[in-house]
Image: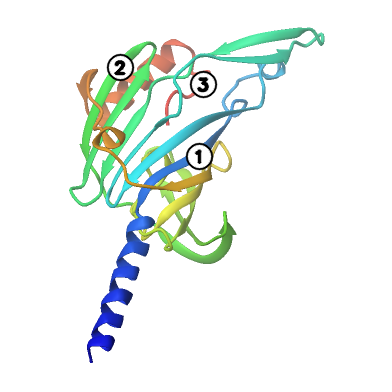
Amino acid sequence: MKKKILGVLIALCYGWNATAQTNEGIVLYDEKINMHRHLPDESMKAVMPEFHTDKMQLAVRGVESLYKNVEVNDTDEETTDQNGNAMRMVRRVPQNEIYRNFEEKKGVELRELAGQKFLIRDELRQTPWKLTGETKKINGYDCMQATYTQPERNQPVVAWFTEAIPVPTGPAGYGGLPGLILELDVNDGERVYTATKLDFKKLTNADLRVPSGGKKTTEAGFNKIRDDFMKERGGVMRIGG
């Protein structure tokens, strides 16, 4: 009888440890941005690379997550002009941090726009995901496809998530699914997020620090500031996520 009880306890502890090991750690993502999507003419496309990739990281612990740049530095890229002459372009990587607590429905974001920082606090809304029944493997994990359309911009979003990692989060603040999002496509390839490395480990409080500083506003308030800024610049490119 004692052996049976011991066996059950060992099985329960193993199951708990397996869950603990897959709901806390650091996930690295490549965030691939289509730089040509919103350029108005071919001459501008000729002097700018079509795609740019940023290295991002997601710190996750259960229902909490923090998504941010791996490094915040200016990036130096080489391209050519219409005459084939070599050019170097410096692209400013803004400091953006996205904190989510899906249990408390709490969202805090630090966004940088035109050198100014904004702190956005809003209640998380439930995303109307629809499961399609499509499946595929990503990094060895069985993933399911979920889709929805962003109402503000009328953009399709396609997510691939795995229930093997039982956390309701993903890159760029997306989440609300019964598993980690390993791949995400926003607006038919305009932005594509792909998990490149998963490191399950115990995190410190500093790893999941809630963003602070910046001018306080709401999501709607920031969107208005961003849209006004874009109008002043002629609407050449969309800033932010």
Residue 153, how many percent across, how many down? Answer: 42, 37
Q: Is residue 135 left or right of residue 113?
A: right
Can residue 215 be seen from the camera position used here?
Answer: yes
Name which residue lies at 48% across and 47% down.
Answer: 198
Kindly identify the amino acid type of the residue bearing the numbered disc 1: Tyr
Kindly identify the amino acid type of the residue bearing the numbered disc 3: Met
Q: How many marks?
A: 3
Label 3, residues with CA under 10 Å away: few <14, some 14-19, many ≥20: some
1 or 3: tag closer to the N-terminus? 1
Q: CA distance from mark 2 to mark 3?
A: 19 Å
Residue 125, how many percent across, how many down? Answer: 26, 47
Dots 1 and 3: beta carbons under 8 Å? no
Q: Quadrant of residue 151?
A: top left
> Is the N terminus in the top left, top right, bottom left or bottom right quadrant?
bottom left
Name which residue lies at 34% across and 29% down.
Answer: 97
Q: Nearer the viewer, residue 53 or 147?
A: 53
Can residue 128 be seen from the camera position used here?
Answer: no
Q: Is residue 217 above or below residue 78?
A: below
Dots 1 and 2: beta carbons under 8 Å? no
Which label belongs to residue 29? 1
Which label belongs to residue 117? 2
Which label belongs to residue 171? none
> Is the C terminus in the top left, top right, bottom left or bottom right quadrant?
top left
Q: CA distance from mark 1 to mark 3?
A: 23 Å
The residue most toward the right is: 83
Q: Quadrant of residue 221?
A: top left
Q: Which residue is mark 3?
A: 237
SS assignment at label 3: loop
Nearest to viewer (mark 1 / mark 2): 1
Q: Nearer the viewer, residue 157 or 64?
A: 64
2 or 3: tag closer to the N-terminus? 2
